[in-house]
Image (cartoon, rainbow, N blue to C red):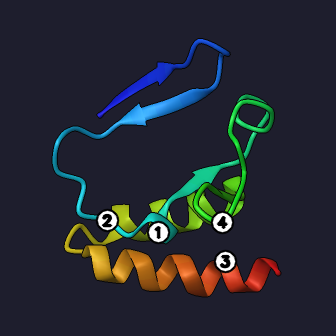
């Protein structure tokens, strides 16, 4: 993965040839840096730093935390933000 900037100074990540992820699984932490540089929409979904940190803490406590576990945690925690 490689973080890059477009000509008009927007951020994007090059994930390489094989991504295999659903576009609706793309969550980006919204902060001072990303707030104005990411085009927020149904695909580029904002994620609060608090939710990101809760998921990160869960992962660090349990290294066998799978992608499926990550998605379940993400969507359930994201629902509490609404």
Classify residue 27 by image quadrant: bottom right
Question: Viewed as shown, does residue 30 lie left or right of 59?
Answer: right
In this view, which residue lies farthest toward the front?
Answer: 7
Q: Which of marks 2 and 4 is nearer the N terminus?
A: 2
- Of tags 1 and 3, the one toward the viewer is 1
Q: Earlier in the sequence, mark 4 or mark 3?
A: 4
Task: Tell me whether circle 1 and circle 3 mark residues in contact (CB < 8 Å).
Answer: no
- Name the residue that disc number 3 marks: 78
**Disc 3 on helix, strand or loop?**
helix
Q: Which of marks 1 and 4 is nearer the N terminus?
A: 1
**Disc 4 on helix, strand or loop?**
loop
Q: Return the x and y of residue 20 as percentages of the image width and height.
A: 23, 63
Gap between marks 3 and 2 measured at Cα: 18 Å
Gap between marks 1 and 3 measured at Cα: 12 Å
Classify residue 11 by image quadrant: top right
Gap between marks 1 and 4 measured at Cα: 10 Å
Closer to the camera, 70 or 38?
38
Task: Tell me whether circle 1 and circle 4 mark residues in contact (CB < 8 Å).
Answer: no
Closer to the camera, 31 or 7?
7
| Mark 1: few/some/many CA within 10 Å (<14, 14-19, 20+) | some
Numbered circle sitting on residue 21: 2
- Name the residue that disc number 4 marks: 42
Q: Return the x and y of residue 77 as percentages of the image width and height.
A: 63, 80
Numbered circle sitting on residue 25: 1
Gap between marks 4 and 3 measured at Cα: 14 Å
Picture layout, residue 10 above or below residue 51: above
Picture layout, residue 32 above or below residue 27: above
Q: Return the x and y of residue 7 as percentages of the image width and height.
A: 59, 12
- The residue shown at (31%, 65%) is 21
**Disc 1 on helix, strand or loop?**
helix
Task: Tell me whether circle 1 and circle 2 mark residues in contact (CB < 8 Å).
Answer: yes
**Disc 2 on helix, strand or loop?**
loop
């Amino acid at each position: 993965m490689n973080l890059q900037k477009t000509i008009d100074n927007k951020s994007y990540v090059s994930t390489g040839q094989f991504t295999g992820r659903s576009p609706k699984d793309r969550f980006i932490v919204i902060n001072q840096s990303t707030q104005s540089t990411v085009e927020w929409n149904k695909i580029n979904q904002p994620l609060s730093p608090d939710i990101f940190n809760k998921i990160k803490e869960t992962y660090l406590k349990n290294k066998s935390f799978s992608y499926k576990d990550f998605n379940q945690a993400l969507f359930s925690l994201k629902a509490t933000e609404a």
